Image (cartoon, rainbow, N blue to C red):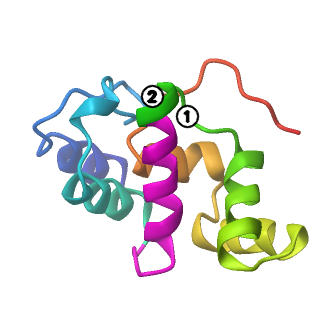
Amino acid sequence: MNNAMHKMSTEFQVARDPEGYLVDPVDWDESIACKLAAEEGVDLDEAHWPVLRYMREQWTTNRIAPDVRHVMEFLVSQHGFDKKSAKAHLYKLFPYGYVKQACKIAGMQRPRVWSTG
């Protein structure tokens, strides 16, 4: 499967690091998100896009990937979740984790240091 993933990644017309994250988040668009999601085994649907678009808006404004806490606050304030269900929802959408899947699919660079709290 690794060979298939590596081969798939060569179809990208954007620079990626060895882990598959975009080198420059400016290169991201929604078609790239779909390709990245396919590599991660995530079938994007209407529930994923508000999170991904929020992350992109935050990156555009701040030039840094939003911390998972901010994404959960967004789900609470804009989509009617409570804190516990927001976290469960986020991990249902991205079962291998926020940094591993959500950040990668949203076109973020691989974070060097990440807040886990």
Quadrant assignment, res 109: top left
| Contact check, label 2 and label 1, Cβ < 8 Å | yes
Q: Residues within 10 Å of mark 2 (few under 14, many from 20)?
A: some
- Name the N-terminal-most of marks 2 and 1: 1
Relative vertical location of residue 26 with respect to residue 49 in this rendering, above or below = above
Q: Which residues are magenta?
A: 43-59
Residue 64 located left or right of residue 31 = right
* Image point (49%, 67%), residue name: 50
Residue 77 located left or right of residue 60 = right
Residue 19 located left or right of residue 22 = right
Residue 73 place in picture, x, y as percent: 76, 57
Picture quarter with the N terminus: bottom left
Question: Which label lies toward us, 2 or 1?
Answer: 1
> What is the three-letter code of the residue carrying label 2?
Gln
> What is the three-letter code of the residue carrying label 1?
Ala
* 58 falls in the magenta region: yes
Q: Which residue matches tag 1?
A: 65
The disc placed on residue 109 is 2
Quadrant assignment, res 94: bottom right
* 71 falls in the magenta region: no
* Image point (22%, 34%), residue name: 27
Quick one: SS at disc 2?
A: loop
- What secondary structure predominates along the stretch shown in magenta? helix
Quick one: SS at disc 1?
A: loop
Residue 58 place in picture, x, y as percent: 52, 41
Quadrant assignment, res 24: top left
Residue 7 located left or right of residue 81 = left
The disc placed on residue 41 is none
Distance from disc 2 to disc 1, alpha carbons, whole Å, reads 8 Å
Relative vertical location of residue 96 with respect to residue 69 in this rendering, above or below = below
Picture quarter with the C terminus: top right
